[in-house]
Structure formats: C-alpha cells, structure tokens
Image (cartoon, grey):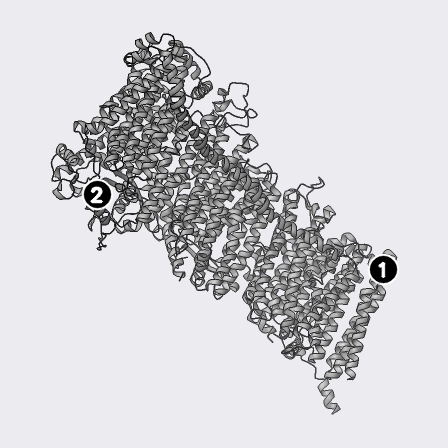
Amino acid sequence: MNMATITNDNWLLTVGTFLPLVGVLLMMFIPASEERTHKQIGIVTSAVTAAVGVLTLLRFDYGHSESLQFFVDSEWISVIRSNYTIGLDGISLPLYFLSMVVTLLVMIYTWDNMPDAGNPKSFIILMLVLQVGMAGSFIAQDLILFFVFFEVVLLPMYFMIGVWGGEQRQYASLKFFLYTMFGSALMLVAFLALFFQTGAESFSFAHLAEAGALIDRDVQIWIFAGMFVGFAVKVPMFPFHTWLPDAHTQAPTQGSVILAAILLKLGTYGFVRIAIPMLPQGAKAWAPVIGILAVIGIIYGALGCLAQTDMKRLIAFSSVAHMGFVMLGISTLTEFGINAALFGMVAHGLITGMLFFVAGSVKHRYHTLEISRLSGMLIQMPRLGWILGFAAMASLGLPGLAGFWGEFPAILSAYNPNFGLNVGLYRVLMVIAALGTVLAAAYLLWLYQRTAFGRPNPEFDAHAAHPVGAGVNDDHHGADIHDVTPIEWIAWTPFLIAIVVFGVYPQLMFDVMDPAVSALVERVGAGIP
Amino acid sequence: MLASTLSSGWFLENAWLIPLIPAIGFAFIIFFGKRMPQGGSEFGLLSMAASFAIAVGATVQWIQRVNSASSEGEHALGGFFGFARAVLPMAGEEGGHSAAFVEPVVRTWTWWQSGGLEFGVGQHIDGLSIMLLLLVTFISLLVQIYSTEYVSGDRRYTHFFAALTLFSAGMLVMVLAENMIQLILGWEIMGLCSFMLIGHWWEEAANSRAALKAFFTVRVGDVGLLVGTAVIFFGANDWAVERGSNGFSIRAISAWALSGEASNSVLFWGGVALFIAAIGKSGQFPLHTWLPDAMAGPTPVSSLLHSSTMVVAGVFLVARVYPVFFVGFDILDTAVNLITIIGGITIIAAAALAFVQDDIKKVLAYSTVSQLGYMMLGLGVGAWLPAVFHIFTHAFFKCALFLAAGSVSHSGSHHSFDMKKDMGGLARKMPITATTWMISTAALCGIPFFSGFFSKDEIIDNASHNGYQFFYWVGLIGAAMTAAYMTRATYLTFFGAPRGAAAGEHHDDHSDAHDAHAAHDAHDDHDAHHDDHHGRHAGPHESPWRITAPLVILASLAIFSGYLNAPAVGTHYFTDWVEPAGVAVAADHAATATDGEEHALGFAALAAEEEGGYSEGCGFTTPEDGTVCYAPKLSHAEFAWSKAAPSIVLVAFGILMSAWLSMGVFGDRKHPLKGLTSRSGIARRGHAFLVNKYYLDHLYEGVIVKAVAHPIAKAAYWINQNILDGVVNGVGRSGRATGEWVYRNLDQRVVDGAVNASGLVASETGHALQPIQSGKVNQYGALLFGAATVGAIVLILVNI
Amino acid sequence: MIASLLAQAWTAPTIDWHAIAPELVLVVGINLVLLVDLWLDEAKKWAMATITGLVLLGAVVPVVTLAVLGGDVRDAIFDGRYVIDEYALILKALFLLVGYVVVLLSQNELEEGGYYQGEFYVLLLVSVLGMVMMSSSRDLMSIFVALELLSIPAYMMAAWRKRDPRSNEAGAKYYLLGVFASAVLLYGMSFLYGTTGTTKLTDIGVALSGELSAMQILAVVFVLAGFAFKISAVPFHTWAPDTYEGAPTPVTAFLSVASKAAGFVALLTVLYLGLYGADEVHSPMIWAMAALTMTVGNVVALRQTNIVRMLAYSSVSQGGFILMPLAVMSTTAAESALRAVVIYLLIYAFSNLGAFAVIIAVSRSTRSGEISSFGGLMSYAPGLGVLMTIFLASLAGIPPLGIWIAKLQAFRALIDAGSTSAYVLAIIAAVNTVIAAGYYMRVLRQIWMSPVPDGDTTPIRPPSSVWLALGITAGGTVVLGILPSLVLRFADLPDLTGALGR
Amino acid sequence: MYAVNFLILGALLFSLGVFGVIARRNAVMVLMSIELILNAVNVNLIAFAMMNNSAEGHVFALYVIAVAAAEVGVGLAMVLMIYRNRRSIALDELSAMKG
C-alpha cells in the first residue's frame, strides 16, 4: 500500500517465486518411472526455493517493514495498463515465507507418504506449480498480476484433490473448482469496475489505493460486493464454506495441508491487501456484514465440528471457525484486529496444517478416520498421540501457543471497532466469539478424549490377546500401527517448533506486521470522511 | 518515597527466573526424562528446589525492602504502627502514621505490539506475589517429594512429573504476571495441566471425562476473563498510555481504577466479567461441580492443584486487580455485592454437601470449595488482607489434609478412598498421619491458636466491621458446619472399628479411584511392586518417610503459619509485608501530568455520605495530580476475644455435636459403652448420654438424621448432582445435539443443497433445451427466419 | 462526349500490387495446386499437403512485409471498398495461419481415408482466399462475394466423406441453412442499399445516422441475422452442432475457427463502419444474442457425451463471449470492444484448434468420439493429456493460459461502457464462465481421474504433422497467455480503429 | 410508384421462398425456393438501382446471379450425393444427429 518503495535486491522475489518452475522443467524430461529421482528433485527444488526465502528474510529491512521492498515495476501488458509490479512488506512477508516452508515440508513428507494413486512425477510437478501461484499471489502489487497468480493455484489443487483424493474426490474437486471459479469471476468484474472507476490509469495497488478512496460511496459498496464474494469463497466465510469440508476431507494429506496452510489465506489476504485499502467506504459499509458472518462462521463451524464422526472432516470444519476469528479481526478495521488476523492466518496455517498431517498419518496407519473406531492412540502411538494433543491445544487457542495470538486480540479488537462502526453490535459479536472459544475447546478435547484416551480398539490392537499393558511399548505392534517415523519428524518438527516459538514470543511476527498494518489502517482512515 | 530509595536485590530483580526454571525443567523432563534413572522426577525436584530457593531469597529481600520503606517512613516501628492501624482507623493522611507504599519491583520486556503500542511480559513483584511465589514453590516442592513415593512405578511417572512441573511454572507465571495477558497465559497453562493430571489415568473413561469436564467448565469461566480483560483494557488504555504504560499492565489498571477517571460502568462490567472467570477457576457456586470430580486425579494432584494453589487462582485474580472490584462494586459502601453473594452461597452449599460424602477426598474437595468461598467473601467485604492470609494458611492445612488422605489410601486402605467401607480405627495404625490430619483439621475448623483461626476469623470479623452483617452470620454458620463435617470425616477415618481394607481384608468392590488405580496398575510392572508391597506388610501401616515428612512439615506450618498475623498476640508481620499501603504516591511514570482539571466528583460525594469507616485516602478521594494510588485504603477490624467468641462457641458446638452423633451412628454396635469409652476421650465425656444407646440411635437416625441432616444435605446433594452438574453436562450434550442438527439440516440440506441444486438446474436446463436441436432442417430454417422476423418486428415496434 | 465517356470509363485504376499480393499469391497457389493435382499419381498425393502449406506460408510473406512497411492502402485502390490496413493484415495473417494448421491436421485424415486430397486442398485454399478477402472488404458487395467464396467450398468440405451419411447430412444441413441465411442477408442488404443508395459501408454509415425507417430496421436485422448464422449465434446456431459432429474433424476445426472468425470480421466491419448509426437496433439485438448464445451453448454443452459435439456447443458459447463486446459497440467503449473481439478471435483460434488437434490424435487410436473414450489418457499418453488440459483450461479462461486475457478484454470493454445493461451482461458472462468450466472440467476429469475404458493403454503416436500443429497451437496458447502484449501490440495500433475510422 | 410495385413483387417472391424453405420436405423444392428468394433480392436491387439511379444495384444483381448459379451447382451435387447414399431426398430423414 505504501508509496515508499525500496528496490534493493529486487531480483530476489522473482527468483524465489519462479524457481520451482526450473524443477518442473527438469522433471518434464525425466520418465515418470524414476520415482525417487522425482521426489529428490522436488525436495531439492523446494529446499532451494526456501533458501531463497530465508535470504529474503535476511535482506528484508525490518526498519521499514511498512514500505514495499525488493520492489520491481516493469512493463507487462501495457495495453490494459497492467505491469509486472511486485514487492514485499510486513503484511505479505510472513505468508510469502510460510508458503515456501510449507511446500518444502510437504515435499519431505511425500518422500514416504505418497498417496495411493501413485505417479509422484505429476504430483510433485503440481505442487511446485502450486507453490509458484501461492508465492506469486503474496508478492503481486498489481491487480491483474494478483488475479493471474490467484487463479494459477486452481488447477493444480483441482488435480491434487481429484486424482490423489479419497472416495468422493471427483465430486469434491469439481465443487472446489467451480466454487472458486465463481468467486473469482465476480471478483474480476469488480477489479475491472474499480479500474475504470479510478480513471483507467493503472492496476497497481499503490495507485488504486490512492484513487479508489475517491470513488463515491455507493459505487464502492457495489465493487466491494464483487470482491467480497470472490474472497469470501476462498476464505471461506459462512454461506460460501461448503466446498471446504469436502475438499479438505477428500484431498490427500499434502493437499489438505497446503489448502489449510496457504490457500485459504489468499482470501483473507485479499481482504487486507486489496478490498479494504482500495475501497475504504465500501469496507466500512460491509464491515458489520463481514463481522456478523464471521461470528456466525465461528459458532456454526464449531457446531459443525461437534457433529462430525470423521476426524479429518472435523478438522476441516474447525477451519471455518478459525477463519471466522480472522475475519472478525479484519472486520473491525482496527490495528489490533488486522494484526490479529494476519497472525491468525499464519497460526492457523501452522496448527491446522499440523492437525492435517496427524490425520493423514492416522489414516495411513488405521486406514480409517472414524472417531468412534479410534481410541487409545496414546497407548499404541504415544508420540503421535501427544502431537495430536499438542496441536489440538494450540488449535483451541491456548496461550503460549501460536493460536492464542490470532484469537485473543481479534476478540479484544471487537470491543471497540474503528471508524465509528456500531459498537453495540461488535460487543455482542465479541461475546459470541468468546463463547466460540469454549465450543472450540469442547470439540477439540472431545476429539482428543475419544481418539487418544481409553484403551485401543481391539480391531487395531495387534496384541489383543495379551494384556493391554503390552501396548505400552511401541515396538510390540502390528506392522502398520507404528509411531512417528523419522521422515514425519523431519516434516513436522518445524511446525511444532514454530507453533511454540510464535506462541511464546509473538513479537517476532507482530514486529514485522504492525508498522505495515498501522500504515494501512491510517490509509483507510484517510479514505473515510 | 521514591522507588530508588527502596532496597532491592538480585533475587527481587530476577524473580522472573522462578517460573522460568520449572518451565525449563518441564522441557528437560519431556525430552530426557524417560532416560533418567529417576524417570525425570529429579529434574522436577531440582527445578522446584531451585525456584524455591530463589523465592526464599526474594522474600527475604522483599522484607528488607519493606522495612527500608517503613523505616524511612516517618512513623514508629512495626509493633506500634500495626497496633496503631488497628486502634485508630482514621490514621490516614493526617498524622502521617501511614504505611509507606512499597514500590513493587516491576520489570518488563517487549512481548508483542499492535498499533504501535508495545506490550510487555515481565514481573510485578509485590507482597501478594511474593507470598504466593513462596507458597507455591514450597508446596510444589513438598508435593513432588511426596509424589516420588506415591506414584512410583506408575507407567506415566515421567509424564506425571512433567505435568506437575509445568503446572508449577504456569502458576508462578500467573503469580508474578506484570500484565493481564501474562496472567491469562499462566491461568490457561494451569487449566491445561489440570486436564493432563486429572486425566492422568485416562484408560478409564470416567477419569478422562472428569478431566474434560474440569477443563471445559473452567473454560466457560475463561470467557469472562477474555471479555473482562478486553473491557478493562479499552477502559484503561488511553489513561495508561498517557502515563507511558498500557491497558494491560496490572499497575496501570489498579492506578486507573483508583484515579477517579475510570467510568464506573466500565469498572463494574469489567469486574463482573473477571469475576465470572474467578468463579470458574475457584470452583465457586454454580461452577463448582468440576472440582469434586477432579478428585479422580492422583492425590498429590488434588492436594496441589485442587486445594492449595490452582483453585486459588480465581481468588488471586480478584486480589490482584482489587481496585477494579473495589471501585466497580463499590465495596465498603454496600451491604451486599456480587462477590459476597457468590462467596456466601458457596460457603454454605459446599459445606452442606461435604456432609454426605463417603469418599474422603470428596469431603476435602467440598471443604476446599467452601474455604474458597471464605476467601471470596473476604475480598467481597473488603477484607483484602484476611482473605489473602487465608489463602496462605489454608494452603498448608488443606494440602496436609489431602496428603494425609492420600497416605491413608496408600498405606492404610489399599488405594480406597471410601471412608465407610475401607477405613476406621486407623489412628492407631498410622499415628503420624492421624496426628497431622487432626492438627490440620483443627486448623481448618478454626480452633483457636491454630492457623485457620487467625485467618478465617479475621474474615468473619471484618465482614461485620465493614457492614456486611448478613455475611457475618453466613461466615459463622459456615464455620460451625465446617467443624461438624470435618469431625465426621475424622471419626470415620481414624476412629471406630476398622472396616474393609483398613481391617486388612482385600475386596475388589472399591470406589472409582481405586478402580482407576487398579486399572492403571494393570498396565504396568507396578503389579509386581504392588503385590510384594502388600506381601511385606499386609494391612494398614504407617507410610514411608517420603510421605510422612511433608505431612509433618505441613502440619506444623498449619499450626504456626497463623502467628505471622495473629492480632490475638499482636503480630502483624504478614500485614506489613503483604498489604500494599493505600496511599497516593508520585506516579513514577507520570511523564506528562497533562490533566490539570479537578476530578473531585463521584468520589468526593461518595466520601461525603460515607458514615462508618473513614473517607480519606485512596479509593475514596481522587489522588492529586501527578500522584496515583495502587491500592485502596482499607481498615482492619480490631481483634477482640469478645468478637471471636461466637465463632469459637459455634465451632465447639459443631465439633461436639458431630462427634457425638458420629459415634452414635458409626460406632461399634456390639459393646457401645466399652467400645466408646475405651475409644476416645470425647466419647467418655458423652458417656452419660450414651447409656441407653438404642434410644439414642433411634433419636439420631429417626429424628435428626432422617428428619433434619440428611434430607437437607441429601436434597442439596441431589440438586447439586442433577441440576447444577446436569447443566454443566447438559451444555456439552445439547451442544452436540445442536451441532448434529445444524450440520444435518442447515449445512447439508440448505446451504450445501443450494450449491448442488444450482448445478443441477443448469444441467436440467440444458436437457430441456435439447429438443430444440431436433435435427430437422426445415425446423432449423423456421427457427432462423422466425427469430429474425420476430426480432425485426419487435425492434420496429420499439423504435417507431 | 462519347469520347469523354470512354475516356472516363477507361481510366484504369492504379493497382498497388504489393497491397493485394497475399490474395494474388493465393490465387496463383490455387491454380498451381490444381495443375499439380492433375499430374501427380495417387502414390505421391501426400505432396499436395506440403505444397498447400507452402502456398499458405508464402501468402504470409507479403502480409508481413506490408505490416512492416506499413502499407496503409485505402482509397488508392477500389476507392475504399477494398482496404489493406493493419486490421486487415492481422486477420489475413490469422486466417492464413489457421489454414496452415488445418492442412497439418487434415493430412493424415485424408491420406488414410483415401479422399480426394487435391480437390480438398484447392477448396481449402479457396475458402481461405475468401476469408482473406473478407478481412479487407469494406463494401456490401465485396463482403457478400467474400462470404460466398469462403462458404461454398466449406459446404463441400463438410460433406467430404461422400460415403458417410453423417457427413452427407452435415454438408446438406450446412449448405441449405447457409444458403438460406445468406439469402436473408442479401435481402437485408438490398434494403440497406435501397434506403441509403450506396453499398460502400462508410457512406452507409453516414446515411444511416438519424431516425431509422422501418425498412432500414428490417434491413439491419436481416443483415445481422445473416452474419449471426455464420458465427452460429443463438438462435441461428442450430446447424453448428450437427455439422460439426458430422463433418470430418479437421473441417470442423476449420469451420469452428476460421469461418466463424470470418463471420465476426464481417459483422465487425459492417457494424463499425456501416451501422453505428443504428445502434438502438443492433445493440439490444446483439446484447440478447450474446446472452442467449453463451448461456444456451453452455447449458446444452453440459449434457453432451460426444466430445466433438460438446466442443461444438462450447464454440457456440465462446461465440457468445466474442459477441459480448459488440453489444457496446456504439458507446465510447467502441475501441476497446473492437480490440477485444480481434484479440479474442486470435487467441481463441489457437486454443480451439489445439483442442481439435488433440481430439484428432486421440480418436485416431480410440476410434471413438465419446468423452468417455478419453478415460485415463494421462496414464498412457501424458503428453496429449497435458496438452488437452492446457487447451481446455485456456478455453475455460483460466490464467495464465491464452483465453483469459481475451475474456479479460471482453469484460473490460463491457465495464468500460459502464452502462447498467453492460454490467448485467458482464454478470451473466461471469456466471457462464463457471458453467463452462463445468463441462471442460468433465473432460479433464476423464483424462486425469478416470480409468481407461478398454484396458488398451498402448501409447498414442500422432503423426509429425499433428505434433507440429499441436506445437504451434500450444505455444500460441501459453505464450499469448503469459505475454499477451505480443498480440495486444497489434490490436493496440491506433489505426486499427483509425483504419476503420469512419 | 412503379418502384414500390417492384418492391412488393420482391416481397411476395421472398415470402414464397421462405415458405418453401420452411414447409417443403423435398430438397430440390427447397433449393428452388431459395432461388426464389435470391431472385426477390435481384428484383429489389434493380428496383432500388432505378430509384437511386446508381449502377451499384445492377452490379450487385449480377454478382448475386453468378453466386446463385454456383450455389445451385453445389446444391444439386449435394442432393445427388444424398440420393445415391439413401435413395431419397426427403430432408426430414436427415436427422441422425440431434440434441
């Protein structure tokens, strides 16, 4: 948003974003039969990409995190006045880096957890393409460019779900695809409307944020409506959420993780980065609606969770609730709220991603995710059980773990929203949202109690004959029910560490985001008479 | 009196290490515990010992700090000035006989920021936190020692110690919290640990359910904590930021609440919200039902978490940000307020429930609830110090009681907690345990010269002193009931004829706790240990030293801790060291004293119509510009035996009545006289009544028990189990049901249905349109030309 | 006086040979092919394809030189009734290129079918010539002639498989309706000429300003109907599915791309130059046609099981999208509308041809046109699978593949116009993109997610010519999607409109 | 006023032709109907040429005649082909492809 830009090392972003394509090209020329090679290439590529990401972190000027850095602005589609404009600021940096790390870890996880459909070549190629789209969406500073990256993500995810997914995969994948299509089509119309309303000069964020505020209110409201649908589908917000449980449940573990960790964030990011700063008055007019829908989502998602009998589907529904908190924070238009939202995005990415990993491994071992059939996980797989407990605790917003910092400030911020939004309404929302945390505790603990506690279900207990005590030591077990494997450790440890570190010392992220957010809110305020 | 002139020291400055060390210890246990010879318990013990050491150091330095402050203050020494405070409540600004305000030792580091505001994490050390630091580290240490024996051989020995240590860390974090967020952090960590520890033997559905229930119930209260924090934050923030602090800082909140600039409604609602959290955590009515269930956990857990430390977190919260409640509920100006109501109900209800428990731990659990009620009541009536003091004393004797109960079940009753089935007559078999138990009981009952007397009685006394007459009586009745049910428990456990396991027999229809234990035994090699453990000495016997040592220590403290603040003998060290003086001090970070206008409204008026007590000083008048108050100015009732008498009498009555009845009911039927007389001195005194025993039994069982005691208590219990508890469980169940319904009908049918329907519509439309494509050329031509013509006609009609 | 008359009659127009070189090359090429065909014996007929290809590429050369040397020839020859400008040149290039790809695609089809190769290529060339002329025509007469020149050979090509009744049926339907439509068109033209007194579009434009008479409205409607038939806009589309399904696939490709494009070119020229005064007549009509076309085409396509027929309906709906900007032709957005159509035609040609190319390659081995026959293509022909994915995704308008930028331009034109009706149309189009994605994804689902229907997983080996075609189309689709400026540059030339400048 | 009559004649022919195209099942009849329409067009063109006294109409008419001839040639060929294959030229039998 900020006009100030820093163009040192401006090659970094482009390299970091498009590097995976090198791997893709390489793999194109290697026969699909050489699976190990493909996996290796995948891991190496994403590792190098992540390394570039680390370099970006190092080169980032934290003193000016509110201004765009590594800024590039070069000709692209001059006719429609759209440029290849990229840059990174405190708002996008965490998500940009997260996308790289998640991809790397998922690659590693794939090493010996390839979904049943096989064919790692296509699988890994798709993931790499996905990575390009995700990273690109976070660096784009031009509406059209953003739109392109935003859409690039679609197909790979469609195929990941559709080819490597569960029984209902075809239905789920198509639903995901069409739903998102629908959203982005309306979104595109909104973008163009914004473009022409601002005098058809440029698609660059900076310009639109300047000029967008001058559009008169009613028009802003209409344009915002279009963007709202587009982003709300992606988030997903309450009435548009139904693709999510199906997609999550059917997707392969890797797909679920990426979906939860990054893809959903594109929607919320869009709100923060595009819809709100460019259409301040529209945002103000829509904020109560968003807030209400968000809170409905919190309660509704929680209730949905309580109704689930399938572990993975439960986790999927919990995403609806968590993103509800994020959206509530955004809808307050306060620094607190938006900071919380951004933090919540990352936290939710880590935590829910972790939960999906665990769910995937459970499925891998038990070949079922029926909560009623799972029990005594702590006896058969103590470590996995503890990790599940840890992730569950983090997910219900326990202070000291990352989840809390997305949740509490969001609730806090609802106490007095910005720009003269209806305080009474928001205080009601705050209390309901707070109650939502109780429900979160309810369904997560309930899940944990039934899956991890108790004695193992005889049908899975390899030593049902022996006294239950034999279940204590992990090595006594049937071939497929074993505890966390080294590869899983490698893939998961970063998540676990990050959850703790960000939980204990949130300043790590707030320090980066806050200046950018303050600048953004200031800009919005300027746009509201 | 500037902070600079106050003495400080390394321990005070680095008190933040106290929670940090156990936290690290926890990490060590988790990662290396299993490989250690002692299964990781050594890490726990070490870390607790270390933090205890630091806590002691900090305490010493704090006392020096206080003395340095008061010595520089222009008033007489402790003795006189404590007395002075008692005799002339008017000792306010005039005369200058005021205690020096001892600047807390505050250190913060930036933790997170938002909107340019930086929020810290750090330590806020004042009397209250020092007291609790010492208390928590000390008791944790004892309990851990005790546990090494009690849970030895448990298959999750390591996890047990991990959780125990993490718990201590959490509690300590909360105790020295510099701001609300940090307080919440500790608060929730404790919740988590209690979940882990209550559910320690999670193979049993019952235990894991209890764990779930505890966490869930407390979580309900936490909504209040979140909301309250938010309310207070936004109330205080601007004021605080102006003075270089922020709305989370506890100092800022206190000062703001007393600054006279705080809106009363904000304070009120914030207070209500926070108090709801306290209700949940401290097992106050009506959210107390989780606490008895929590007894499903191992006894050390009960003694540490659910008697002496964690459950007082709620009380601590209220005490910590007391100004909010003081002003919000304007205590001292009313005869009744939310806190006192809840506290009062809790005292009576819980005490009544304690009567009908057969599980010794449940008796103690309800007694805990009831005692917590006293603490709340104390805070509610403006008896801040007595309430805090009661936390202090209660911790010792209640912990002792639990450990004694544990000792009984461990060595006396074969892991049973059922007083009626498996105990009785253990006094002779387990002398140490019995003695310590009875000392602690005496303390709990508030028998003079035991610690409980000095704290509890102060609360009751101040209730009337501050104009809460009704609750004065509530307190007295509660005291009597306490005495009565404790006597009953004592008798059942240690006197009378040995029954069940206490008589050395093994039978397997034990209480849940036993099953749980047995079940967990079944999992591990504990069986072996278990058996030879009984092989060595069948039947009841005294516990090994690792159990008795803590008992002895605690019991002795149960006697002597009271003398830290025994007005009866004129000591008031506790007051001097812990109570923050309610005087205005130069706001050390009032960087810009911008607000020069008068705030004489509200408070001045209040002060005017204040009759009893006094009307000057913090909490009554607005501090002058540039000065702030951190604590309200509170008066203390003057101790007098005359005032203590009623409670003493009532307690005595309760004990005697109960003892007499207990013997009558539970006594040895065969040879009443011999049995009784030979059994206990109390009974010998009641000899005369007991001659015609059957008549007595009849009288008791027929009349009193059936007609009076039981119906009431039973009714209370029934309501408790079925209504209150039902609600708690109901919430869960109905939540599930609602979830099911919403998901089935709303989500799958309506919302999702709409989505899928739209797809269907499109495809069906296509189907409907296919006939147009008939394949016949003529029809195609007709359509072509027809469309053109129609179009032409319409357009012509429109345009001409 | 007679002398003067003669003198006037005999002032021979100065002919700019360079300007009409493309047409000349084609004419020469046509005769060449005819002659060679006579002498060449059946064994060597394969050479015909090569020669035809060379001719088409040869015709591109002068187009390029004209573009480079900026030959902007208007009134010089044929006094503005036949014009060579950038607009014309882009389209000429497009048609020639499409013709070349179609040749590549037809080669094996014809060889294996043992059809009359020589004649086929001649007709193809003639048809292309008609299109090339169409892009320069600025007069009712030349438009009509060009139209027939490109249509009549197409009728025959559609019926090329003489023994195949389906092919016959395709040809017959196409022919009868085509002729009927052009008759209606002519009837409209005659009124247009009658009421304006000229056949030169620019003059018609001048004359048509102001209040319209009933006769003129009728004329406009009939003219539009005639072109609407060519571009198979609903409700004038009925022939398309049947013809596309029955005709030989390469021919279908040719029809669905080239002759449709030609129709659009004619429509564009006429609307922009001649009928801009009659906007209150054609705007609503085109608006309705666009909405109907995209919607009907899409929803009916949802039900199709034959892939060619599905693509037929898809190209109908795509026509709707191309038509969309024309609805705002008469507003300030005229320029962006014009640009949008041209861009769309260019990119659409690549993607659609590509899709047909894959179908040709696959159906050669599966011998089936059912969508289900694509089941599990990824497992035995990943190359073709990926290519098909690219083409269909492009048709669905997913960035960064070709058509997204075209769709973007179309939306852009509408929103540029900014009128309510335009916004409504934009929303309808937005919804339609989703429906369209529905059936494109169905094919992709077969390719990626379904098992092979008959266990036969012998890898497919398409002939090199098809590979070449695939290469060209895929390259175009991807490159134009990522770097649209390459083509947008042409469309951006000020004198694209300037050339047509009234 | 003469011209108007020509136009009316043209309209009549046109209507006849359209009727034939729509109503006739016989391919040859349809062809002839189309010829009618084309001739209607010719009549119109000539009439208008006369009104506007410009030559374009005549030229246009000539083009139309030529093109019409070509069309009929192709058309008859096609009819013949169909007749060979199915011994009938009834159009409504040509409906193998529909929907």
Does residue A153 appear left or right of residue B250 in this picture?
right
Given the image, what chain letter belongs to the residue carrying mark 2? Answer: B
> Label 1: chain?
D
**x, y (%) of residue A20?**
50, 47
Q: Are marks 1 and 2 on the same chain?
A: no
Q: Residue furthest bottom?
A: C1
Q: Tell me if label 1 and label 2 are in contact, CB under 8 Å.
A: no
Residue B296 in the image: state x and y as whole percent.
42, 25
- Residue placed most toward the observer, D76 or B401: B401
> What amino acid is found at the position of numbered circle 2 in the picture?
Glu
Q: Determine which quarter of the picture holds residue B300.
A: top left
C421 lies left or right of D76: left
For disc 2, the marked residue is B611
Whether residue C126 appears in this view of the structure is no
Circle 2: element type: loop
Amino acid type indicated by mark 1:
Ala
Q: Nearer the viewer, mark 1 or mark 2?
A: 2
Residue on which the image places disc 1: D90
**Viewport quadrant of the C terminus of chain A:** bottom left
Q: Is residue B203 left or right of residue B283?
A: right
Closer to us: C282 or B601: B601
Q: What is the quadrant of residue C453 in the picture?
A: top right
